[in-house]
């Protein structure tokens, strides 16, 4: 395992994989939190919505994440895709994303917008400009892909769960390996210190024995000298 973790090619691939997973997960979490906190309110003139039905297929598929920009409704034209808030009994309070098929003024000289899902047979009831949230700019790259993956059980398992578990496993394995290496280094240092202490003790003992021997030799020499002196006096 240590050889695998220390392999340069593996480290590069693993680093890229981990970075992609972390960035995508953080981005998706931010997207989810922002949607929940703001309740799809405008942020700097932009809103993000998730497509819930197939009325705009194949332009926008179910679970597509789209970006909507607020703008002057007078600039809208036929063919623009817009998000609006339904006001009739059948769609009251529902946010709908459909395509403008015509723009007309009624008998009261009010501008009315007529929309229809590209996959629908019938057009929607006409709406006023005040109901329009904004124009659809397109899909949100990255978040759109991840949303499809998360909403699909197989995609979530193979593209999110398995890589995430792999990253966690490798991080734990790397940490354990580092701890073992550190423990071995501490043990080696401890053994070296203990060996040095033993060597120092032996050196000290040898020095002490040498000093003792020298002292004994000096004492013997002194005795010999004293004996020699006594002999001379007797003679």
Image (cartoon, helix red, strand yellow):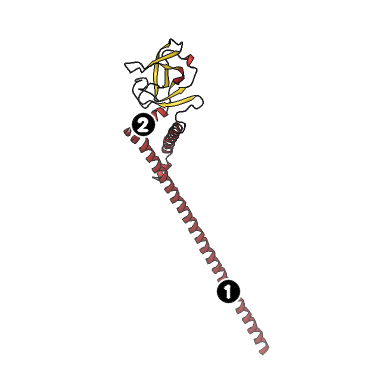
The residue shown at (42%, 48%) is 176
Residue 60, horizontal then vertical, whole percent: 37, 22
Rendered image quadrant of residue 40: top left
Residue at mark 2: 149
- Residue 63 % position (x, y): 37, 27
CA neighbours of label 2 inside 10 A, class few (<14), some (14 to 19), many (20+): some
Q: Residue furthest front?
A: 108
Whether 232 is drawn above or below 65: the answer is below
Name the outermost residue toward the right.
Answer: 233
In the image: residue 162, left or right of residue 225: left
Gap in Å between the C-alphas at discs 2 and 1? 85 Å
Residue at x 56%, y 67% (from the top left corner): 204
Q: Please indicate, yes or no, whether residue 47 appears anywhere in the rendered image.
A: yes
Q: Residue at x 42, y 29 (%)?
A: 143
Residue 70 at x, y = what percent? 48, 21
Q: Residues within 10 Å of mark 1 (few under 14, many from 20)?
A: few
- Residue on which disc 1 sits: 212
| Residue 135 makes an appearance in the image | no
Question: Which x, y percent locates residue 106?
Answer: 43, 11
Q: Are marks 2 and 1 in contact (CB under 8 Å)?
A: no
């Amino acid at each position: 395992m240590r050889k695998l973790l220390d392999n340069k090619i593996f480290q590069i691939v693993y680093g890229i994989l981990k970075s992609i997973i972390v960035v995508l997960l953080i981005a998706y979490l931010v997207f989810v939190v922002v949607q929940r906190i703001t309740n799809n309110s405008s942020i700097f003139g932009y809103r993000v919505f998730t497509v819930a039905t197939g009325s705009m297929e194949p332009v926008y598929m179910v679970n597509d994440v789209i970006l909507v920009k607020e703008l002057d409704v007078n600039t809208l034209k036929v063919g623009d895709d817009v998000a609006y808030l339904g006001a009739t009994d059948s769609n009251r309070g529902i946010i709908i994303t459909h395509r403008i098929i015509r723009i007309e003024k009624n008998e009261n000289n009010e501008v009315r917008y007529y929309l229809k899902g590209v996959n629908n047979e019938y057009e929607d009831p006409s709406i006023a400009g005040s109901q329009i949230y904004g124009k659809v700019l397109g899909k949100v790259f990255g978040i759109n892909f991840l949303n499809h993956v998360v909403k699909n059980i197989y995609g979530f398992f193979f593209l999110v769960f398995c890589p995430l578990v792999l990253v966690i496993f490798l991080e734990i394995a790397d940490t354990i390996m580092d701890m073992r290496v550190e423990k071995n280094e501490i043990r080696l240092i401890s053994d070296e210190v203990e060996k040095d202490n033993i060597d120092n003790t032996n050196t000290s003992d040898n020095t002490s024995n040498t000093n003792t021997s020298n002292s004994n030799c000096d004492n013997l020499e002194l005795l010999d000298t004293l004996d020699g002196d006594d002999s001379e006096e007797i003679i």
